[in-house]
Amino acid sequence: MKPYVVCLMASSLDGKTLHSRWRPKGAGGDLFEQVHDEIAGDAWLIGRTTGSEFAKGQPYPQTSSESFPREPHVVRKDAAAYGVVLDARGKIGWSRADIGGDPIVVVLTEQVADSHLAGLRREGVSYIFAGKTELDLELALEILNRELGVERLLLEGGGTTNGAFLRAGLVDELNLILCPAIDGSRGAPSVFDSREDEGDVRAPVRA
């Protein structure tokens, strides 16, 4: 079963999401955290770029004498909430097992090296697989529901990740915190974004 997906983002008045570029500085304060707590979800999800901002380590070694089956590895099943990070090719070295107390769950493709899986296991990081070479977002949601009981997920970007979920028809609700600030920069990250090869792909119409 697919969890109910709520996209939660804070943006400037011109729809940009990189807070460090906003003027005046500090606009919006801790509104995002407040709304995140009020909405409450069984998990929250971010992409690799955003996830890297929380990582404390270096990429794991590229070789390993160990091999692991491509099946879910779940360290904890009793958490109030999980921090889910898309990392299709296994680029992030964590040196931590949780973010703000929420256990990390990494979503990988099956092509990820065994050495990366060994690094995740050493650090107590859970992971699941959703696709052989490319991430299948719908499959990832189904696995999160089946393995961890996630029924309500907060999708919290960045824009490329949000856009991918939108184009896949997986966003059920949008909560947008509009902050009293302006970015004004061309090309700055926005709430929903796309890669160059996705520019002509439109999100399906939801009834």
Image (cartoon, helix red, strand yellow):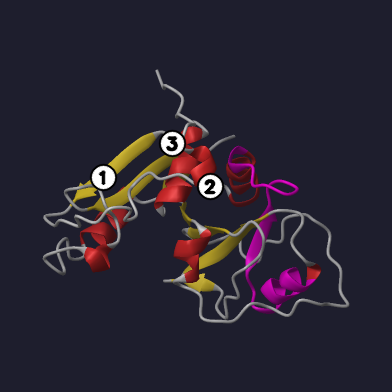
Q: Which residue is mark 1?
A: 176
In percent of the image, x 55 and y 78: which residue is there? 96
Q: Is residue 196 visible?
A: yes
Which structural element holds mark 3? loop
Q: Which residue is mark 2?
A: 150
What is the x, y in percent for residue 8?
33, 48
Q: Please identify, in this view, whether the residue under mark 3 or under mark 2 is nearer the observer.
A: 3
Q: Which residue is mark 3?
A: 171
Asked whether, in this view, residue 25 is left or right of residue 103, the answer is left
Tell me: residue 125, above or below residue 168. below
Q: Magenta segment range? A: 115-138
Asked whether, in this view, residue 192 is left or right of residue 112, the answer is left
Q: Give the alpha-carbon distance from disc 3 to disc 2, as whole Å.
A: 15 Å
Which structural element holds mark 1? strand
Q: Give the alpha-carbon distance from disc 1 to disc 3, as whole Å.
A: 13 Å
Asked whether, in this view, residue 104 is left or right of residue 160, the answer is right
> Disc 2 marks which amino acid?
Val
In percent of the image, x 76 and y 76: which residue is there? 62
What is the x, y in percent for residue 184?
19, 55
In percent of the image, x 16 and y 54: which residue is there? 179
Asked whether, in this view, residue 133 is left or right of residue 77, the answer is right
